[in-house]
Amino acid sequence: MLHREDNTVVRRLLWVSSLSAVLAVVAPSAWSQTNTTDSGGSTLRQRLKDKLQDRRDARAAVEKSASTDAASLEQLTAPGSYSFKLQHGGSQRAYLVHVPRGYDATRPTPVVVAFHGGGGHMNLQANANYNIVGKADSAGFIAVFPNGYSRLPSGKLATWNAGNCCDRARDLNIDDVGFVRAMLVQLQSRVNVDPQRIFATGMSNGGMLSHRLACEMADTFRAIAPVAGTDGTLTCSPVRPISVLHIHAKNDTHVLFYGGAGKDAFRDETKVADFVSVPETISRWTQRNRCTAAPKRVLDVPGAYCEAHTGCADGVQVQLCVTEKGGHSWPGVKEVRSGKEPASQAINANDVMWDFFQRIAGR
């Protein structure tokens, strides 16, 4: 494991990213032409212009904070796991990068960003129990594990600002969206990233952040696949449609399937929230993506099923996968947490989400 401290942003990449965002927003499409007004009477065009300006301002702030030239960044060419740090929003943040076996630095490579759960840390999400690293090696994608906000030097007990959750990251209004943007800029200077195949997933509070990123970084992420973490965003106006796969256990005892905090959630209301239900989460995304077709059962196995909503704007999909058992866990993992129900083995979250990402990307 290599350790680097970098406060780096690549100006050239920022310029290209900004130009891509502009083209994505101003290009004519059914998405921009048919949604002309919102409930407040403002035009969608103006809302998109405002969103674009917000993104420009965010990128400008990131660029201003950079203090290292692009030439000094470490280029990753060999498979393995690497850790890096960057300064953002007055705090030192960290992330892990796993370069898969068989990585070819001359070929654009897909990226899956995996966010740990509340009270966890990046090493926990990257460990063998979740097997995301193993899936990255077999499937050939770069896996990235960011660390949430923590007041501890170790980075442990970290949380994400996902809207209505969680803990200090929420209460201090930590700019996790800006951190993710800065991290991805660094990543694109280190490895050959396919910009059309950047995906996000996460466990619990990390899954909630994935929902927020779909709302605020649809110009960057092609699709998200949160696990056991519902949509807690306070506002959501994606600049374009985005595909969503949500995975949840019917008997989740923390983020309850039908809403609210369960028996194994923190009782301190400053740390958790009245979690949005899974049905409401799916309803929000089908409305945002203007899906018209009735849900279709696309997987039905003992202990689990998946339903897909199609007929959505720009051909995106909204899909829900439900396990009957497993509680608040990552389906397919073998580890049994102390005092907790074993994860469901009816489906493997890593396999289901990667198949979804591949299908969405047309690969």
Image (cartoon, rainbow, N blue to C red):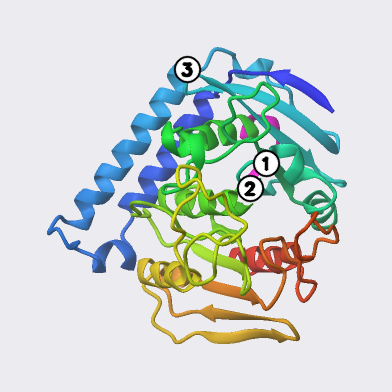
Residues under labels 3 and 2: Cα distance? 28 Å
Q: Any mark on residue 65, and which?
A: 3
Counting from the top left corner in percent of width and height, residue 107 is at 73, 45
Quadrant of res 121: top right
What's under tag 1, amino acid-wise? Gly
Q: Are marks 1 and 2 in contact (CB under 8 Å)?
A: yes
**Left or right: 259 with respect to 112?**
left
* Residue displayed at 81% across by 35% down: 81
What's under tag 2, amino acid-wise? Gly
Q: Are marks 3 and 1 in contact (CB under 8 Å)?
A: no
Question: Can I make out residue 76 in this image?
Answer: no
User: Which quadrant is the N terminus positioned in?
Assistant: top right
What's under tag 3, amino acid-wise? Ser
Quadrant of res 248: bottom right
- Which span of residues is magenta-colored? 188-194
Residues under labels 1 and 2: Cα distance? 5 Å
Question: Can I make out residue 164 in this image?
Answer: yes
Query: Earlier along the polypeptide chain: callout 3 or callout 1?
Result: 3
Counting from the top left corner in percent of width and height, residue 162 is at 47, 46
Quadrant of res 44: bottom left
Query: Earlier along the polypeptide chain: callout 3 or callout 2?
Result: 3
User: Which quadrant is the C terminus positioned in?
Assistant: bottom right
* Residue displayed at 62% across by 52% down: 202
- Of all residues, the one furthest to the left in this rendering is 41
> What residue did someone put label 1 on?
120
> What residue did someone put label 2 on?
117
Counting from the top left corner in percent of width and height, residue 276 is at 44, 63
